[in-house]
Amino acid sequence: MTDVAVPLTSRKDWMSDQEVRWCPGCGDYSILAAVQLLMPDLGVRRENTVFVSGIGCAARFPYYMNTYGLHSIHGRAAAVATGLAAARPDLDVWVISGDGDSLSIGGNHLIHALRRNVNLTILMFNNQIYGLTKGQYSPTSEVGKVTKSTPFGSVDQPFNPVSLALGAEATFVARTHDMDRKHMLEVFKRAHDHKGAAFVEVYQNCNVFNDGAFDTVTSKETRPDNLIPLQHGRPIRFGADGEKGVVADSQGRLRLVAVADTGEDALLVHDEARDDPGLAFALSRLAAGPHEPTPVGVFRAVPRADYGSLVADQLVAAQAARGPGDLAALLRSGASWTVT
Amino acid sequence: MTDTASKDVTELDHVVIRFAGDSGDGMQLTGDRFTSASALFGNDLSTLPDFPAEIRAPAGTLAGVSAFQVNISDHDILTPGDHPSVLVAMNPAALRANLGDVPRGGTLIVNSDTFEDRNLAKAGYSSNPLTDGSLDAFTVYEVPMTSLTVEATKDLGVKPRDAERSKNCFALGVISWMYTRPVEGTIEWIQERFAAKPKVMQSNLAAFRAGYNFGETAELFVSSYEVKPTTFSPGDYVNVSGNTALAWGLIAAAQLARIPMFLGSYPITPASDILHELSKHKNFGVRTLQAEDEIAGISAAIGAAFGGHLGVTTTSGPGVDLKAEAMGLAVSLELPLLVIDIQRGGPSTGLPTKTEQSDLMLAMYGRHGEAPMPIVAAKTPSDCFAVAIEAARIALKYRTPVLLLSDGYLANGSEPWRLPDVADLPDISVPFATETNHVDDDGNGEFWPYLRNPDTLARPWAVPGTPGLEHRIGGLEKQDGTGNVNYEAMNHERMTRLRAAKIAGIAADIPGVEVDDDSGRELVVLGWGSTYGAIGAAIRRIRARGLRASQAHLTHLFPFPADLGEVLRRYSRVLVPEMNLGQLSRLVRAEYLVDAQSLTKVQGAPFKASEIESAMLALLDNATARVGTENVT
């Protein structure tokens, strides 16, 4: 079959006619804009693109994309998308989710989608709060968080989403934030182009229930000293003039240093393609939360066959070995007998 | 003394044999093999496997007893038999657990090697039943199966423990002789099954032959028996279990719908065999996902259905509980989906390996909101094939999730099945939407995902990959037609009623109630699911007494056949036997205001025909008495 060239599109072609109904000032707007801006550059067709979501503020996302979309139930987006991507490996399937949806009620589906390496682009909007249910603490809320359901402060240890994804055998793990469109565009494109499960944690500000949760890392003023950009093959350094860096000691522990003290050669060189996820994991543990220097960028990107392709390969192999299914023969495949 | 060289052969019209032993003794395998030999020989048959949930319960205990009952016959039969006429007991516990079902005068074949103090004590016997006279009412054959098996295999270099394991083949040999089964098939089967383990194969072959020869030569059995082949109508036959027939039915349904099939499933007894069977047939384009949990199983199937596949999830009651929210989603999305419930005893984990029909109300009402789903149920193991196709037909045509109910008895039980001609199976394909279906104010074509077919009320099924039909659907209430999210009061009322009307309308697209003999007016026995055989057998008995009763059996439980109320009202008495506490009877009483009498049983075992017969006799006596009284007054 000859494929005709993918038609050129503009951002507008990817916007649905539905009114966007997030709270004014919500970080979701900038993420939506980034995705809509990105789509024309991906070389994909609208009809082959599907956005799948669960429940939560982020989960309204598919309604705003002029593609196929499925707004499912709380926590199950990864499972629904697994079925779709396994059945239809020809499609481009995106999962839009939040910290409650993906890490609490849907935690099981997320980790299994990652370990299976289902060909999905998973954007997890992390705002460290339950927004749609009006302000309860989430599985990424910090210890001590005071919310409607934790008036005396949360005593729950939060998940570190990047650590969790790495522990779940994810082949692509990245972090970006809603205040940097250019970075979002880069990371989303990388995630989309990755064959297999790509997990992106997006720091997303909920200006109504958890305003400023990521300001330390994302605001213009404090960003230089607290956002550690990860760039493959480059020494890991940050600060307004790149005066700070990350080194690994002889035990493999990472720590922050002044480059002036160690020299540039001592800095850890980022390697997202390393087969062993140990370095990526150590980077994910560098910050206990978004209130201190925190790595942002692609932590890990390694090739591994994706689930839908492996499933399809088995079907092809079975048909090659046994021929296409013959129902009459199947029914007689046991010990059959004939009465005349 | 009988001449051992030329024993008599006595002809029987049927025989019910139960094999019983420890759950590690291979009784299911033995029963299965005897069944296959009988099927190939041409008998009609029906089986009832009955095993504990534990894989290896403590050896020698009552809790660990596993049994397999088979009824073989020279005529058409409907049940595995109320009572075994022959019990093969591999140890004291197997004897004790099953003796109560054997009528006096029945035959017991026991492995006498196991009747020593320790095993007797484990089974709760204070004295040896083989010597204390308690079995005087039975014909008892004491066969030292363990020691004879060890003796028969001693030259093979097999360890004694491994040799002992072949004793089930010895028992199979004895019974194969006793019921004059051809041995070639069983020998080939042993050779194939244990091809990878030559020693085990040799040991089992030696044990089987030794058992057969023992029957022939030992001065123990007076005669052997023959159950002649049944006169089946011409055709090709297989012996099929419900779960296998169901898996094949699903494969057939996908072929008849001309779309690929996707199964999302989590292992659960007694449904897992469907997952196993479907996993084998990838050359049919069948994709199987062993999901991380029950919810993922159905969610993945919904995703695949959105992608244009025949989405299926298979489970048992506890899994249906977990899938409830996702079923509601499928109701709201109006996508085709099959949810298959192989019912077992509940509540909670309940009786995982035992049968029950207690999920009907769950199927009918077990979702929040007004979330109607069509329900179909299979009545025999082979009927699972046809019902799977019917469930798919409804799901595809009406774009709705459908619940298919089977149960543990159908799932594991087997019967000969005359194979359908594939060419005669229905075409159940439905076209995907390919064109826009609405024109906007500017005259441009657009696609409305909830613009319904006026006849079926089904919405169009447009799958990703179709240019121009991009659309978004979800679990939020949507506007009639456009499918856009909508919370308006009257729209919700309209959509709720539309969803209900769509499902109710299926009643016009299914056959009316089939009544097997419509001539009487005294009593109709209304059933659903696996009670079909026992009800049918009970009705035969009633008719043999010169009384009249009719059988009506439902395949469609929601919606009911359009004429069900009218049919039930024709009869003075309605009896509804169910393996629950009266779920269908309550539904028909509520729906039709008929005075349905409920007959219930929740013992993890199917009805015996005699139990239904007794209930029918009681109702018929009352009816007769009442008629008599009316005549007097």
Image: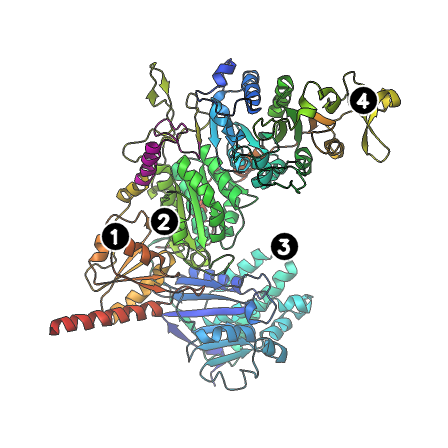
Q: How is the image coloured?
A: rainbow
Which residue does the image show at 48% across and 16% down from the upper left?
A13
Q: Give the secondary structure at mark 4.
A: strand
Cα distance, mark 1 to mark 2?
A: 15 Å
Q: Residue A244's mark?
A: 4
Q: Verify whether residue B494 appears in magenta.
A: yes
Q: Nearer the viewer, residue A197 or B580?
A: B580
Q: Verify whether residue B401 appears in magenta.
A: no
Residue indicated by mark 3:
B196
Q: Are marks 3 and 1 in contact (CB under 8 Å)?
A: no
Cα distance, mark 4 to mark 3?
A: 65 Å
Establish whether labels 2 and 3 are both on one chain.
yes
Residue B318 in the figure: left or right of residue A139: left
Image: magenta residue range = B474-501
Q: Give the secondary structure at mark 1.
A: helix
Q: Give the secondary structure at mark 3.
A: loop
Residue B617 position, x and y percent, is 27, 71
Q: Chain of mark 2?
A: B
Residue A45 position, x and y percent, is 50, 20
* Kind of residue indicated by mark 2: Val
- Image quadrant assignment for residue B55: bottom right
* Kind of residue indicated by mark 3: Ala
* Kind of residue indicated by mark 4: Lys
